[in-house]
Amino acid sequence: MFSFPVGLAKFTKNMIWKSFCFLGVMVCLNANASKHAPISVNKKVAAVVADSMQFVFGSNKNVPEKFRLPFYYALQFYPELQSLHISVKEKKISTTMAARPSSGSVVFRFRKKRHYIVFVNSDTKGKAPHYDEFSFNAQIGVFGHELAHFLKYIKQGVFSLMGDALKYRKDSFKSHYECYTDSITIARGLGWQCYDFSTQLQNNQRIDSSYKSRKEELYYTPRKIFALMSDLGYDM
């Protein structure tokens, strides 16, 4: 009786499963192109999405386990980013998260070969609220915001990126830049998650009022997020 070699059989089974997951992810991506995430994302549902997304698109993603579910759940709303090399790293920074292309890949790699990084604040006692101070829903929202930045980065050349980095020092440009990114996050379907992040930041008693006021100047307030969701036909 003929039988496949063990290695070939395992490879074939893996490819069949990967193809199945790919089809499932594509259905999910197409569905989310025209609908929004639920008001509150269930972790069990997020785990199923994350498993499929990671299996199909995870070869060029470096995401620690603690960030895996919210990262991959948010990623499904950005099909343009599936082929990107993205790493999530913890680092002491002055905000909860920040996203940028790695400096080396901007200078020495072609646009399609760049590597991108999402930094997560590792300082649990700093001025900025720590990642763990937010609900799971809000964590998806902040990852969604950072991934929205990449939609702009992937279209920019090195001089355009450097120009934006210089202009970002001005509050007027920074506010326009971040509010535009919030609007993209909401339009993609993560409005409630963005709303939860903004609301929980403003209600965090540990955070100094000056930090909160600064964020209100630069980003959409909960009221503005709610208004945009209403305009976009979210279930309110």
Image: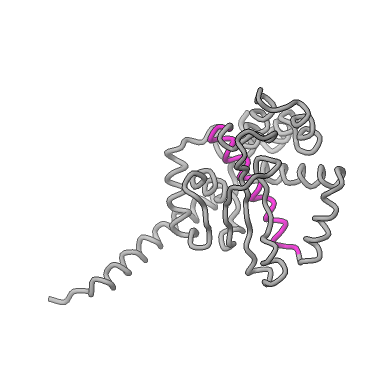
Look at the image and tell me in which quarter the C terminus lies.
top right
Look at the image and tell me in which quarter the N terminus lies.
bottom left
Residue situated in front as seen by the camera: 212 or 148: 212
* Horizontal arrangement in the rendering, residue 5 relative to residue 17 (left or right): left
Colour mode? one colour
Is 53 above or below relative to 141?
below
The residue sitting at 60% across, 58% down in the picture is 81
What x and y, as percent, mark residue 163? 83, 59
Q: Residue furthest bottom?
A: 2
**Magenta-drawn segment:** 134-156
Residue situated in front as seen by the camera: 150 or 204: 204
Q: Quadrant of residue 174?
A: top right
Residue situated in front as seen by the camera: 160 or 227: 160
Q: Quadrant of residue 9?
A: bottom left
The residue sitting at 72% across, 56% down in the picture is 152
Q: What secondary structure predominates along the stretch shown in magenta?
A: helix
Is 9 above or below relative to 27?
below
The residue sitting at 75% across, 36% down in the picture is 220
* Horizontal arrangement in the rendering, residue 161 relative to residue 40 (left or right): right
Is 88 above or below relative to 84?
above
What x and y, as percent, mark residue 27? 49, 53
What x and y, as percent, mark residue 71? 54, 47
Is 5 above or below relative to 231?
below
The residue sitting at 63% across, 41% down in the picture is 142
